[in-house]
Image (cartoon, rainbow, N blue to C red):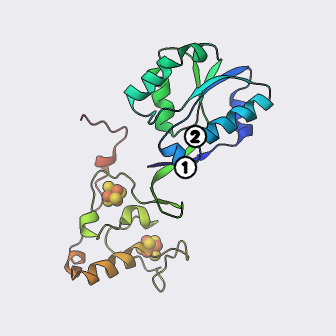
Amino acid sequence: MIITTCKDIEDIIKFLEGEKSVFIVGCGECSTVCKTGGEKEVLDMKASLEKKGYAVTGYCIPDAPCTVAQIRSALRENKKAIDGADSILVLTCGLGAQSVKDNFLSEKTVHIGCDTQFMGQVCKDGVLLERCSGCGDCILELTDMICPITRCPKALLNGPCGGQNKGKCEVDKDMDCAWVLIYKALKEKNKLHLLKESRPPKDHSKMLKPRRLKV
Ligand code: SF4
Ligand code: SF4
């Protein structure tokens, strides 16, 4: 899941400077879970903009605006309302917003209403946790499913730094040291031998941006 947070309404108003009307696009998946671009947030945004004097010509909330088929069909279905607006305000992650821009065959201005934070895991109490940095060369098999690249602020590959104290991370004392967690997990499974091999430095060529894959 892509984790997003809402931009401040005053920042969004600045983006809309000189415009009078807007069409809003939300997201039925990630942004709905994050409460940044689901139906409630889209309607709240509509009400806030109308209060500030903007006309909202319509809105749509495709399940996954980051997929071509879904965003194209949603934009097509709402073409008249979009044509009647000065711009499109997108309450999704950066992927969704760029997907709107790339798939709407018009020069209509697109504004982003959310900040994309990270790829995250949704816990049952509603907490969103960053657990993967998309490094392109997964080592979870060697670390009992605990990602040191993401959960260790220094992204260390060969065990803890000297700063860990009683199992807590020196960067954030409320957080468990990722490498202590890995050690404990591997010990419990009699797999400590996995720690004996030294891992080479990360091959950052696997993370060269922009990455492109064909499925
Ligand atoms: S090692 Fe970590 S950052 Fe890389 S793919 Fe696996 S979980 Fe993601
Ligand atoms: S204390 Fe542990 S988690 Fe924190 S930076 Fe050092 S190795 Fe990484």
Q: In this view, does 36 lie above or below 45?
A: below
Q: How far apart are marks 2 and 1 (CA)?
A: 8 Å
Q: Residues within 10 Å of mark 1 (few under 14, many from 20)?
A: many
Q: Name the residue under label 2.
A: 37
Q: Which residue lies furthest to the bottom in this view?
A: 166
User: Who's the residue at 72% across and 39% down the image?
Assistant: 9
Q: Identify the element where label 2 is drawn.
A: loop
Specify whether tag 1 is near ligand 1 (CB below 8 Å): no
The residue wearing badge 1 is 34
Q: Quadrant of the C terminus?
A: top left
Between 13 and 32, the one lying in front of the other is 32
- For label 2, the crowd category at 10 Å Cα-Cα, with few meaning under 14, some 14 to 19 and many 20 or more, is many
Q: In this view, does 19 lie to the left or right of 69?
A: right
Q: In the image, ligand 2 is in what quadrant?
A: bottom left
Give the secondary structure at mark 1.
loop
The image quadrant that residue 194 belongs to is: bottom left
Q: In this view, does 48 lie above or below 2?
A: above
Of 18 and 189, nearer the camera is 189
Which residue appears at 28% of the width and 57% of the height?
Answer: 138
The residue under label 1 is which amino acid type? Cys
**For the point 55% across and 72% down, which residue is it?**
172
The answer to which image quadrant residue 179 occupies is bottom left
Q: Is residue 171 left or right of residue 148?
A: right
Q: Position of residue 76 (x, y in %)?
A: 47, 17
Q: Residue 180: x, y in percent?
A: 38, 79
In the image, residue 38 sits, relative to residue 23, either above or below, namely below
Q: What x and y, as percent, mark residue 178?
A: 41, 72
The answer to whether the residues at label 2 and label 1 have Cβ atoms under 8 Å apart is yes
Q: Is residue 81 left or right of residue 160?
A: right
